[in-house]
Image: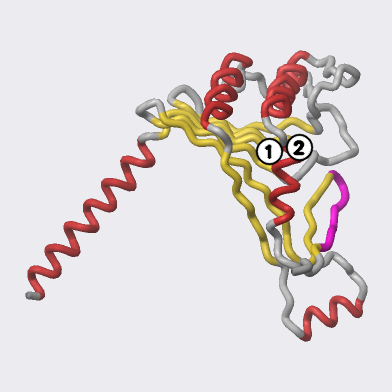
Amino acid sequence: MKKTFYITFIFLNICLNLDSQNNIDSIIKKYEITLIERPQTIELIKYSGNKYSGKIKTKWTKGSINNSWIKRLWNDIWNIEWIEVIEYQELKVETTMKLLEKLEKLGIETIKDCNFENNFCDGNFLDGDSNKFIIKSNKVDRKYYFDEIYPNNGENTEKNETRNQAQKFITLIYENIELEEFYSNAVSKLDKGTYFYSRGAGVIQFKIRKKKK
């Protein structure tokens, strides 16, 4: 009986490992783009078999950033710690397909880095916010950053060629995803408490009060 159990257990483990490996290997392309206006990251994935998956990840920290000695003492007494809270929201398949295709055409996989050879295109920014791009495909595997790239509103067009190209990536996302609406829906799901997230050189803090029944 034990022998049969062990054989079955080993067989199931092999099947699960193979299935997990197939899921990993099936990813053909994956773009992760971190925005700076709100604590949102866009995740776009293309799988083999012409399948797609898109998500918005919104991340906050639950807790207070009040640094008064009374608040610190209260936290120490009750052993209160900050907790990371993440909300995931699905994107439509059509939106994911469109963004993956257009971002690749705009050069998201091949854009130059802001280094010495590119005249340090980012320069000096006081805000401190950065857009992070994690790009993986059968052609590339890279991570790069751009300081303070905002969507083009007609009056803030980036003059540097490389930053202008990165701005087109961000503008495309804003044009195809109702980011503010997604964010409001994500906030509405939070439990009662105080939350915050980093924004530039500072921090945005807000409270969720007990909902009325």
SS under mark 1: strand
Q: Which quarter of the figure is the C terminus placed in?
A: bottom right
Q: Amino acid at mark 1?
A: Thr
Q: CA distance from mark 1 to mark 2?
A: 8 Å
Q: Residue at x 59, y 36 (%)?
A: 32
**Residue under the point 91% across and 80% down:** 70
Q: Who is closer to the viewer here, 21 or 49?
A: 49
The residue where tag 2 is placed is: 130
Q: Is residue 81 magenta?
A: no
Look at the numbered disc 2 and give the secondary structure of its residue: strand
> Could you tell which of marks 1 and 2 lies nearer the N-terminus?
1
**Marks 1 and 2 close (CB-CB < 8 Å):** yes
For the residue pair 83 and 191, the one nearer the viewer reads as 191
Which of the two residues, 3 or 123, is positioned nearer the viewer here?
3
Please give the range of residues in magenta.
Answer: 200-207
Q: Residues within 10 Å of mark 2 (few under 14, many from 20)?
A: some
Count up the numbered dots: 2
Is residue 3 shown left or right of residue 187?
left
Q: Which mark is residue 51?
A: none
